[in-house]
Amino acid sequence: MTTLPPVVLYAGHPDQRAEYAEHLSAAFAAEHLDVRLIMDPAEIAPPEVTHLVFAGHGPLTDLTPYTGLRAILNLWAGVETILPRPDLPKDVPLCRMVETGLTLGMVDYVTGHVLRYHLAIDRYIGSAPITEWERNFPPLAGDRTVGILGLGTLGQACAGALKGLGFRVSGWSRSQKSLPGLRCHHGPSGLDALLSEAEILVGLLPQTPETTGLLNAETLARLPQGACLINAGRGALIDDAALLKALDNAHLGHATLDVFDTEPLPTEHPFWVHPKVTVTPHIASVTRPKSASKAIAANIVRDLAGKALVGVVDRDRGY
Ligand code: NAP
């Protein structure tokens, strides 16, 4: 009896179909994977699909007919919009995206914006640059503490890069960690310690019930006077009104926000015009089809070899 090869269905955005067809085919060939790759859901009977390459803005609105799935490989790192879907099969592993392109893009974004604050670059090239010979020397990176909320794939990569630039780096996670060269805090009790020392605070947390509204009037007040905030995790982390108040009363120096409660950020939202807020339109990082295809192929190889998949979402924790 011959066994049929696994069937991989690409169900990401149709606009990226051609690009993913090229990169998934190449990645599967490089891994010597004997799979059938289907690029259009209309071309396969749902029960035949074993591995679903999935995105929330893709064409599939009902996953219940996909009864033969071994894994759902999400093209995004965040899963907060997928987890509540009633059609999400309960017994099939769901993997969030872990791939080098996504990680490296975030490292670039975070280090760039940290350096902007550290060097006070806006003082010289901002909307009102200095017009007098007033010399303010920034401290050395080693005398500046950057706090990172979230020490997962992205938080650890950013922490490593900032450490490499010489910054003192503290991180906060749910579980206890010990990472070389980082001050690691964890759990609700560790949050105070991290906030009280973070002159630049970076948000790289997933959106869960526990992280929603975590940065509010009370927690923002624990940051040092003049601290700056960079949020590239999810917008729900921040109580917008509390942040605006902390910026207006000068407790916080500036905020760079890439993610928002509602996206696109509504045109009437005060963040757009606030002099102490930089808005970036969820461009901190993105899944790169070439490197993502390699990560997907490697995960399917792992699955077929009976090994643990990378990035499996713990549905109880919500990330
Ligand atoms: P990850 O590897 O799952 O890491 C999540 C981190 O958050 C972990 O360190 C986790 O702690 C920590 N955490 C979660 N809940 C917590 C809580 N209640 N208290 C303290 N720490 C908590 O995720 P990732 O790949 O680094 O991605 C992080 C998020 O970035 C994604 O969920 C996504 O929303 C966002 N993202 C944004 C962009 C963008 O372009 N703006 C791009 C990609 C991703 P443990 O280590 O103890 O589990």
Image (tube, rainbow, N blue to C red):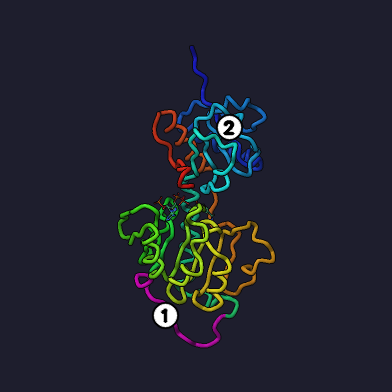
Depicted 37 relative to depicted 157: above or below: above
Please give left or right for residue 146 compared with residue 54 in the image.
left
Tell me, for residue 9, which label it has, or none: 2
Q: Is residue 213 magenta?
A: no
Q: Mark 2 and mark 1 in contact? Answer it, CB < 8 Å.
A: no
Secondary structure mostly seen in the magenta stretch: loop
Depicted 87 relative to depicted 196: above or below: above
Mark 2 lies within 8 Å of ligand 1 (Cβ measured): no
Q: Is residue 134 magenta?
A: yes
Tell me, for residue 128, which label it has, or none: none
Q: Where does the magenta region start and end?
A: 129-144
Q: Residue at x 38, y 76 (%)?
A: 139
Q: Residue at x 50, y 30 (%)?
A: 70
Q: Residue at x 41, y 67 (%)?
A: 195
Q: Residue at x 47, y 45 (%)?
A: 98
Q: CA distance from mark 2 to mark 1?
A: 55 Å
Residue indicated by mark 1 = 137
Secondary structure state at the residue bearing disc 1: loop
Secondary structure state at the residue bearing disc 2: strand
Quarter location, residue 301: top left
Q: Is residue 44 visible?
A: yes
Query: Residue 172 location, x and y as percent?
Result: 39, 59
Q: Is residue 166 visible?
A: no
Mark 1 lies within 8 Å of ligand 1 (Cβ measured): no
Q: Amino acid at mark 1?
A: Phe
Query: Residue 127 location, x and y as percent?
Result: 60, 77
Task: Identify the mark nearer the N-term, 2 or 1.
Answer: 2
Single out the mark in the foreground, 2 or 1.
2
